[in-house]
Image: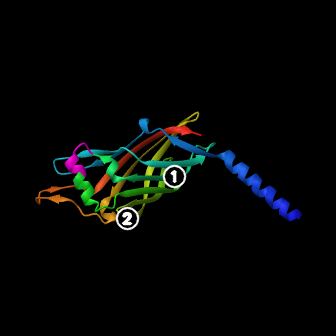
Amino acid sequence: MKLHKLTIIVVSLAAVIGNLQASSFIVDKANSSVLIDVKATGDDFTGKLNNYTAVIRGDKTSKKPSKVTFDWDFLNLKTGNEKRDAKMISWLDKKLKGSFVLSSFTKRTDGRTWAKGEITIHGVKQVIEFPAKVLARGNRMTIRGTAVIDTRKHQLPVIRMIGLFKVDPLVTVRFTLRGTLK
């Protein structure tokens, strides 16, 4: 009986300590952005992801993300050209959901912080690493990063038009997520 009570006390204490250190990051979408830069022969463009779901948890003291899940639907990626958007959806072959799950967030010997995780596009998962910064002031936080994604690794064909025009399969994702620690 004493062992049972001790186990309950230890588990309860661990839960309380975990809750004291863990914090949720509530994204302010009005002041955040997720932009995708695409290079194409004679027509570079930037798309903006207008809606997404981001769940970010981390340590209150270090303000370092420990768990990140980021989900989106490509229907919410807008380039300012409806025809181009429709072609993008067709290119994705009805596999419109995307996601990113963080596996680590570490500072390297050069002082830069890198995020590593698994990104799923077109139903294909790939490990990705990219530099990211976390800026914190009080309970306000900004997470910024830039990642280059090779769409060929997600089994998407290189887009060619009339044999002369080509869309570069390397796209750059730039994000700024602003929010509040809760």
Residue 52 in picture, x, y percent from top left: 42, 48
- Examine the rendering and report whether any part of residue 181 can be seen: yes
Task: Decide: is 125 above or below 15.
Answer: below
Residue at left offset 42%, top offset 39%: 32
Task: Identify which amino acid the numbered label 1 is placed on.
Answer: Val
Asked which secondary structure carries label 2, the reply is loop
- With 129 as the anchor, is 140 left or right in this view? right
Asked which secondary structure carries label 1, the reply is strand
Residue 36 in picture, x, y percent from top left: 32, 48
Residue at left offset 49%, top offset 53%: 69
- Examine the rendering and report whether any part of residue 108 can be seen: no
Task: Examine the image and state in which quarter residue 51 appears.
Answer: top left
Q: Quadrant of the N terminus?
A: bottom right
Residue at left offset 44%, top offset 56%: 100
> Which segment did they paint magenta?
79-85
Closer-to-camera residue (144/54): 54
Query: Disc 1 and disc 2: Cα gap in Å?
Result: 19 Å
Task: Identify which amino acid the numbered label 2 is placed on.
Answer: Gly
Colour pattern: rainbow
Tally the numbered discs: 2
Q: Which residue is mark 2?
A: 123
Q: Which residue is mark 1?
A: 68
Is 77 magenta? The answer is no
Dot 2: within a 10 Å radius of its alpha carbon, few (fewer than 14), some, or many (20 or more) residues? some
Nearer the camera: disc 1 or disc 2 = 2
Closer-to-camera residue (13/150): 13
Closer to the chain start, of discs 1 and 2, is 1
- With 144 as the anchor, is 93 left or right in this view? left
Closer-to-camera residue (109/35): 35
Residue at left offset 28%, top offset 44%: 46
- With 172 as the anchor, is 59 left or right in this view? right
Task: Examine the image and state in which quarter residue 174 appears.
Answer: top left
